[in-house]
Image (cartoon, rainbow, N blue to C red):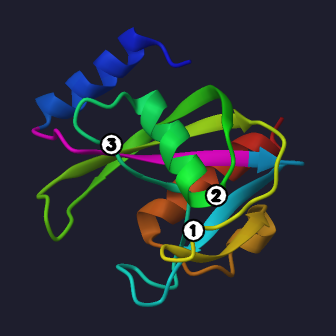
Amino acid sequence: MFPADLERDLRQQARSAGIDHFVVGVAVFRERKLLVVRRVANDWQGGMYELPGGGVESGESFADCVARELFEETGLRVRRIVDVVGGFDYATRTKSRVRKYSFVVEVEPGEVSLEPDEHDEFRWIDAETLAGLPMAPDMRETVRTLVAARSGQ
């Protein structure tokens, strides 16, 4: 589903920068619009929109994490990973540095069904609707890059 040598290279690049914690974001497009989800108000970065995704567990491949997180958060099933978008680094309350990679995927047919403990709303957005959504700056840049690349096709 995702080339093992590419995953090895991505992990090695991060480790050489002192990073060994990973998070994935999952980019799903329908009719040139990108799926984003809103974090519940009482959670970290509550009310902010983001790509579905989450932490890579110990021993878990990026591809397995992408499939697991997308299904847990949206009910959608990954058909295949199409691309990976370069990562960005950030710190959390529990980990000093984390690298987030975003994966563009194709999904099986189905409707979005949110996990209500994590996300309370989803939207299909384009460049125009992105501007009005609350979003962390690094996430906004990733989403802007994804949307721009898709609209240029």
Residue at 47%, 13% in the rendered image: 3
Is residue 152 toward the left or the right of residue 9 in the image? right
- The residue lying toward the viewer, choosing from 147 and 111, is 111
- Secondary structure beneath label 2: helix
User: Where residue 129 sits: x, y (%)?
Assistant: 77, 72
Give the numbered dot on residue 102: none
- 25 inside magenta stretch: yes
Q: Residue at x 47, y 89 (%)?
A: 41
Please give the residue where the numbered disc 3 appears in the rendered image.
56
* Amino acid type of the residue tagged 3 in the rendering: Val
Label 3 – label 2 distance at C-alpha? 17 Å
Amino acid type at circle 2 is Thr
Q: Which residue is mark 2?
A: 74
Residue at the image point whose x is 75% and y is 62% from the top: 127
Question: The disc labelled 1 sits on which kind of residue?
Answer: Glu
User: Where is residue 104 shown, x and y percent of the image?
Assistant: 62, 37
Residue 116, percent across and down? 57, 76
* Residue stretch rendered in magenta on the structure: 18-28
Q: Which residue is mark 1?
A: 115
Determine contact: label 1, label 2, CB under 8 Å: yes
Q: Viewer-nearest of labels 1 and 3?
A: 1
